[in-house]
Amino acid sequence: MDSKNIMHVKLEFEEAREIKKEILSLEIEILHMLNIIHKYRELRMAELKNKQSINLKFKKLGANIVKMKKIIPKVQIPEKYNKEKKEVKMPEKKIAKEKARTDIEFQLQEIQKRLDSLDQKF
């Protein structure tokens, strides 16, 4: 660089001290962030190892279930018992879904009433 391009700025002592404080505080914050990132990476790696371990255990469990199904004898259930179970289960599911819908609709109506009463007050 030529000496023509060099620029000097004069700072007061207090300004320079404040700027140095800000720079040091920024460095501290950056170091804290780096520490957090490092901890995150360690935790993420531990999480991935745990997930792999769980997946391996599930695969072994699935293989064991297949083996057990081959070993255990199959039980013949009369068809009349199978039909009764299917007929009983289906209406219960529908009733539960309808009940949940009505509960949600009721809650929405209550909230709407509260909003209307607040609008009328103001």
Image: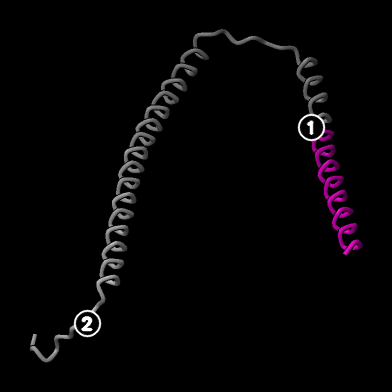
| Residue that badge 2 annotates | 9
Q: Nearer the viewer, residue 82 or 92?
A: 92
| Residue that badge 1 annotates | 93
Q: Please tell me whether residue 74 is drawn above or below residue 113 in the rendered image.
A: above
Task: State the CA–CA distance, disc 2 to disc 1.
Answer: 78 Å
User: Measured from the top left, where is residue 109 in percent x and y?
Assistant: 87, 50
Query: Given the current orientation, which residue lies at the most extreme bottom position?
Result: 4
User: Measured from the top left, where is residue 6 in percent x and y?
Assistant: 14, 86
Q: Please tell me whether residue 35 is drawn above or below residue 29 in the rendered image.
A: above
Asked if the residue at tag 1 contacts the one at tag 2, i.e. Cβ–Cβ closer than 8 Å, the answer is: no
Q: Quadrant of residue 14?
A: bottom left
Relative side of 110 to 39, left or right: right
Q: Who comes first in sequence, dot 2 or dot 1?
A: 2
Q: Amino acid at mark 1?
A: Lys
Q: Please tell me whether residue 13 is drawn above or below residue 35 in the rendered image.
A: below
Q: Quadrant of residue 42?
A: top left
Closest to the camera, between mark 2 and mark 1, is 2
Q: Nearer the viewer, residue 36 or 105?
A: 36
